[in-house]
Structure formats: C-alpha cells, structure tokens
Amino acid sequence: MKKSKTIYLDHQATTPLDSQVFEAMRPYFGESFGNPHSSDHAAGWRAAKAVEGAAEDVAAMIGADADEIVFTSGATEANNLALLGVARRAVGGARKRILMSSTEHKCVLEVGRVLERQLGFTVTHLSVDSEGRLDLDMLRSELNEDVLLISVMAANNEIGTLQDITEIARMVSQSGSLLHCDAAQAPCAMDMSRFADVVDLLSLSAHKMYGPMGVGALFAKRELQGRIEPLVYGGGQQNGLRSGTLPTALCVGLGCAARLASGEHAMGEREALAQRRDFLLERLRELPYPSWINGPKNPEHRHPGNINIGFRGIVAADLLGRIQPNLAASTGSACTSGIPEPSHVLRAIGLTDEEAGASIRLSVGRSSTEEELVKAVDIIRAALEQVSSERDSMFA
C-alpha cells in the first residue's frame, strides 16, 4: 500500500482500514447512533442487533458462538482480561503456576510479572527453538496438576512463527489446565475456523486484520466465563465480563473484518500474500550485502506476510532512519523508558544483541504490489549503500 508517497510494509504493526469495513461502519457514526444497551426504543434495538451480528461474525471466524465473544478495546485488554481474570478467581487454589512462551507479546509478559508480584503465582517461560517454535518437550515436562493456565501466541508478531496450536491444546487438555492464545496476528496468517474447539481463551484485535483501531475481542468458552473476574465494573454489560457502553461502529467494523478474514476467499488471499512475500524476499537476498532470515525457514510455518531479515554489520535503526519517509518498516527492537533494548523475541531464538540490532521486519499486505516491492528493494539498497559507506569512512 502506498500513502503520501510512502510504501507501507509494516502490516504486522497495523493494517489499513478495508474500504468494505469502512462502509459497514459508516451508518453507525451517523444516523444509526443508538446506544446498543438502550432496550426501551427502536434506535437502541437497531444498535443492539448490529452488535449481535458483529459478535456472530467474530464467533463464526473461529468456530464459536456469539455469547462467547466479549468485545474489548483491543488484544492487549483481551490478554489482560484472560490472564488476570482467570488468575484472580483462582487465587488460593491448588493451581499456582502459569506457563507462557518466551516469545509472547510484551503485554502478556508484563501481565505475567503482575501475576507474580501481586497475586503470588509462579510464572515459567517456555523456551523456543531457533525458528521460534515452542519447545514441546519442555511444555510436556512442565505440565502438571499445579498449572492453571498456559499462554501461547498463534502467530508471532516479529518473526512470523506459526505455532502448532492443535498439538499444544492436546497436551494442555490432558493436564486439566486452560489454554489461552493471543491470536492478534492469526486471522491474516491461518485458517481459524476450528480454534474454538481447541482453546479456552483467545484474543483478537481488529486493526491487525484490516479493521478499525480501538476494538478487539476475547473468546471465552461459555462454561469458563464464571471463572473470570472482570477488569472493568459498571452496568454489567457483556454478561458482566466487561462493563461499559459498546462502540457500535467499532464492533461492526471488527465483525466485517472477521467476515473478510474467513472462508475460501481468505485462503486465496493468504496464498497471494505469501507469493508477494516470497517475491520481496528473493530480491532482498540478491542484494550484495550479507544477510540472514530470522524465524521459520519453511514458509508454511511462517506468517504469509512476514519477513524478518538481518544485514550483517548494519545497525537496523540507522537503516530504518535512511529509508524515511519513503518506506515504512520496523525493527524488532523496543524502547523501554527511552532506552533501546534488543528484541526479546530475537534473543529467545538465540541471536546475539548485535544480530538482533541488525534485524528489520518487513510485512506485506493485501494491497502491496510487485511494483511497490521492487521500489522498496531499491530504497533499501540505497540505504544500505549509504550506511555502509558511512561506517567504512569511520574506520578508514
């Protein structure tokens, strides 16, 4: 996608709003403005019907029922509600341990720290292999009757690794523990039609799948909902799990995005996305600079839009600075209190700090064209030449 002369290759950070989604939302910003919780008049009924339809669409994407969908402000809130909600109700019980992969999103890892500090749970971080796949032997050895919940991301947001959620779920179910899945990146990466059959809790985000920012959802199995302590109290909306007036337009947008991410059309779109990714990767590998790929080597085990590539001897932050404002990409590094840190995901798969600091993520999307991808490689080539020249002159 190209906006304001910038080629956009950061679709795993956020996706542009699909035009069909925008049109589905439009009426609820204007004439259909009713409060979906106003049960005494037709305006409220119409809004409620729209929200119910959206819940049905989200549920259908993962094979769930509409009453198992809890709308949230996004995947971060959904992750918090899942982990904190279940843990708070379980304090004092026999299950005192939480397992999570070492490559989870930072919001999940931070909730883990809260569970330890405030609620007294023991959190164990499960290791991954060099391509980011969960160590199933470690999971098997850690699973026992004192484990309350396991959290595993379906599709990694940095290196694109797709986990075998079905096999993980089979192992977890044998222990009597609960399985939570952060699936924010999954709708554009895999078929999710059977996820509700194998996981207990699942988090989604609209703006990762061409929906609006500011809305997401938590899938919580019906029989589990009584075991979740809400984070937000008030009028008891959404079965008391998340109070507050729902934003009708945003919910409708999430529902429409879920429809577009489902079915045979979505399968073809994922295949097309993978072709664009491979087209870009082939040309990046032809650049006259030593490079390597982070994450799965087998494209079937990787998000179809994801490339995470390192250029030896290059500082990624310098490279990204040189490509502005012509190309939008990102680095695996994150900033904490203004202090740059190597990506915890890249460190977990065995990269050194120098290698992690030399890696960038490029993520293609629905509207990425071959013409744009060719131009993107030219932009990166020019930036690499400039950074390399400046580096060489420093040591001349």
Image: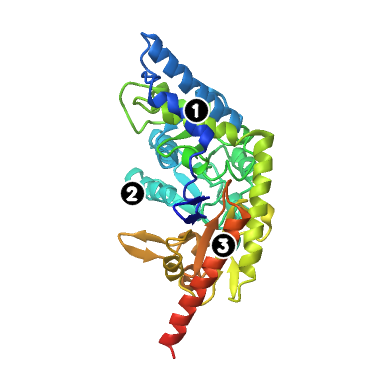
Question: Where's residue 316, x and y in %?
Answer: 46, 68
In the rendered view, tell whether residue 129 sits above or below residue 21. Answer: below
Question: Which image quarter holds the C terminus?
Answer: bottom left
Q: Secondary structure at mark 1?
A: helix
Q: Which comes sooner in the sequence, label 1 or label 2?
A: 1
**Circle 3 Cα neighbour tier, 10 Å, few/some/many (<14 / 14–19 / ≥20):** some
Asked whether residue 220 appears in the rendered view, the answer is: no
Asked whether residue 38 appears in the rendered view, the answer is: yes
Q: Nearer the viewer, residue 80 or 23?
A: 23
Tell me the distance, in whole angstroms, between the alpha carbons under discs 3 and 2: 49 Å
In the rendered view, tell whether residue 336 sits above or below residue 169. Answer: below
Tell me the distance, in whole angstroms, between the alpha carbons under discs 1 and 2: 44 Å
Q: Which comes sooner in the sequence, label 3 or label 2?
A: 2
Mark 1, residue position = 24
Callouts 1 and 2 close, C-beta under 8 Å: no
Q: Secondary structure at mark 2?
A: helix
In the rendered view, tell whether residue 326 sits above or below residue 395. Answer: above
Callouts 3 and 2 close, C-beta under 8 Å: no
Q: Residue at x 47, y 41 (%)?
A: 207
Res. 339 image quadrant: bottom left
Q: Amino acid at mark 2?
A: Arg
Residue 375 circle label = 3
Q: Which comes sooner in the sequence, label 1 or label 3?
A: 1
Q: Residue at x 60, y 62 (%)?
A: 374
Q: Nearer the viewer, residue 322 or 81?
A: 322
Question: Where's residue 113, x and y in %?
Answer: 38, 50
Q: Amino acid at mark 1?
A: Ala
Mark 2, residue position = 117
Residue 260 circle label = none
